[in-house]
Amino acid sequence: MSGRIRVWPLPAPTILALWALWSAVVLALAAAAWALPISHPDGWGPDLMRIAPPLARWDAGWYEQIAREGYHYDPAVRENNVGFYPLYPLLIRLASGGGPSAFSAGIAISVAALLGALLLVARAASDAEEDALPALGALLFYPSSFFLAAAYTESLFLLSTAGAFVAARRGRWAWAGLAGAAAALTRFNGFLILLPLFWIGREEAKRLGRWRPRAVAAIVFSAAGALAFPVYLAARWGDPLLYVHSKTRGWAQHPRPIWSLAVGALREAVARIHEPGAGGKLVFAMMAGSALLFTILTAELFRRRRTAEGLYCAATLLLLFNSGTLDALHRYVLGLFPCFIVFGSWLVRSRPAAAAYAWLGAGTGVLLLARYVHWIFVG
């Protein structure tokens, strides 16, 4: 062990205060942004808009629909709600009874999951012999971090993946399996949690001279979580890959060779330069900048020999780069908490750099939040 100060459990009250302050500020900013006299498209029609809080936009409507009506699929329609994984809308349904409070329930679940996620990221930072607060600051000041309080899966996914890592690192395999299955039921890329769980189990097996049955069971249980939604789709519609087929038909994701992403990104950059206004340029810069930054941070994880964490982040980025688009990449990287731990360790070395990041991140985040609230796509 190095001489670094361990930050768990002493900062728990600090993390609680940080979470409460950040959540209150984001909710207040969203409400203030919605009160601004800005013209905006009518995203869902008057009935849903009357009950939708400012942090429930875009994909939140799909989760609300699944919570209220369940899954349905119409091949004649381009976009179907089978393009969204089940755990988050299931929790919304349990919390709201499928009633008109589904949006608020979704936001409440996200905010509550964020608290657990922050505590677990702090533990993960401590286990990596890094200070927790810089890691949390890097995460919460990231410009797209307001999605952690929105009716989206970001916080729940962060909670489950961080929980799987922390539990596995500490040999608590029952919790690791439960968290891994939850991650796999929250997002499509949740199945990638199998990579670090296998690697951590392998490291443990090398130390002990054998695989622990609980480690094997945790990996199997996580794999079962990853298979559950495809099995459901196969049983109901005869297509275990219906999620993928739905995404490639109705959304921008189309699997392509990774090298084609650079060509597409270059074309989009040229188009953004010639379009009026700075909003689209800002969003594209965030997407492209996130791709570069998190590639570098992932490489640093391998350099520091955090192989399990590096494998998870690298596999996630490869899957995102293979989607054929940079759309929403700056939101998807919010789940890559090992990268934020590294990023925080870099920022803490320089107070001017940390201050510049905080101001730039907060300012950009407010602009993105205001656009999101008014139905302008930001990821």
Image (spheres, helix red, strand yellow):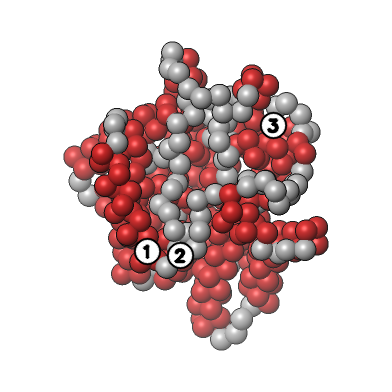
Find residue 242 and report its image quarter.
Answer: bottom right
Residue ID at (54%, 44%)? 155
Residue ID at (65%, 40%)? 63
Q: Amino acid at mark 2?
A: Arg
78 over 209 or under it: above or below: above
Position of the N terminus, as image quadrant, is: bottom left
Mark 3 → mark 1, Cα distance in angstroms: 39 Å
Q: Earlier in the sequence, mark 2 or mark 3?
A: 3
Q: From the top left corner, tell me how far across and down residue 319 is, in percent.
A: 48, 63
Marks 2 & 1, CB-CB < 8 Å contact:
yes
| Disc 3 versus disc 1: nearer the observer | 1
Residue 102, disc: 3
Residue with the mark numbered 1: 260
Q: From the top left corner, tell me how far across and down residue 368 is, in percent.
A: 39, 33
Q: Nearer the viewer, residue 238 or 74?
A: 74
Residue with the mark numbered 2: 256
Q: Residues within 10 Å of mark 3 (few under 14, many from 20)?
A: many
Q: Amino acid at mark 1?
A: Ser
Residue 33 in view (yes/no): yes
Q: Amino acid at mark 3?
A: Ala
| Disc 2 versus disc 3: nearer the observer | 2
Q: From the top left corner, tell me how far across and down residue 90 is, in percent.
A: 72, 44
Q: Residues within 10 Å of mark 2 (few under 14, many from 20)?
A: few
